[in-house]
Each structure stands twice: as C-alpha cells, then as structure tokens.
Image (cartoon, rainbow, N blue to C red):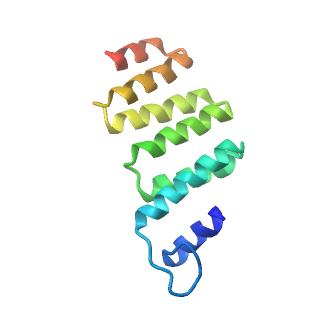
Amino acid sequence: MLTKMITSMKANMTLSDKAGEEEQDPTVYLWLLYFTAQHFMYVNDYEKALYHINEAIGHTPTVIELYCLKSQIYKKAGDQILASDYYEEARKLDQADRYLNAKSSRYLIRVDNISKAEATMS
C-alpha cells in the first residue's frame, strides 16, 4: 500500500490512481517516504529503509528528523559509526537544540569518541 502511494505521488501528486483524486501537497510525499522508511526499518529491511530515507533527504535536505531516522536505521542495522555520523549531521542543522546535542553525544560515546561527546555537551 505504501509503495503504491509513493508511486502515485511521484506520477501525479495524488495518493491513488483514481480519477478526480485531489492533488496533495509536496510535504505529503516527504512524510510518506519518512513513514515508509520507518516501516522498513521496523521489519528489518534496512536496504529499503535506507533507499526511502535517502529519497526523502534528496527531496528536502533540511529536515532534521530525516537524519535522525537515518541514524536509527544504521544503529539498528549494526553500524554504530555511521549512526553516530548521521546524528552529528542532524545536530549540525540545529546546534541550539539540547535534545539533539544530548542524543548526538550519546551516539558518540557508543563509538568511544568521548572527547567529541564532551565538547558537544559543553
């Protein structure tokens, strides 16, 4: 169902191929990609999850949540270093966000980058 919606959104910006369907806002496509990536992460299909989150980042590269999800996908797939890198990327988009600073530091500690984690928290 999700992949059909994505295909329809790419083709004609509607959620289905039915005639007369209302055209959707481009943000619907973005969050549909996000939700689909999240779904594939939870069913442990990391390749498809990364494909969809990369599509979303390509669509709107300034949305912090996309990088956070990409980090979570890599973490769940077992690549702690890339997970840390992408949380750091998310943090750089909004350095005043204390939550992102704390999460990024936590991911840095997991990969034994204590000095960078301390600098991030300070």
Quadrant for the C terminus, please. Answer: top left
Name the one closer to the observer, 80 or 14: 14
- 115 sits left or right of 84 in the view: left
Q: Position of residue 19 (x, y in %)?
A: 55, 87
Q: Residue furthest bottom?
A: 19
* Residue found farthest to the left: 96
Tally the marks. 0
| Picture layout, residue 61 above or below residue 94 | below
Residue 107 point in image, percent of width and height: 51, 23
Q: Which residue corresponds to the image point at 41% horizontal and 22% vertical from the top-left?
A: 102
Residue at screen point 49% across, 16% down: 113
Q: Quadrant of the N terminus?
A: bottom right
Closer to the camera in the image, 63 or 81? 63
Residue at image location 61% in from the left, 31% down from the top: 75
User: Relative to residue 57, is residue 96 drawn left or right?
Assistant: left
Residue at 44% from the left image edge and 26% from the top image edge: 104
Residue 33, percent from left and from top: 54, 57
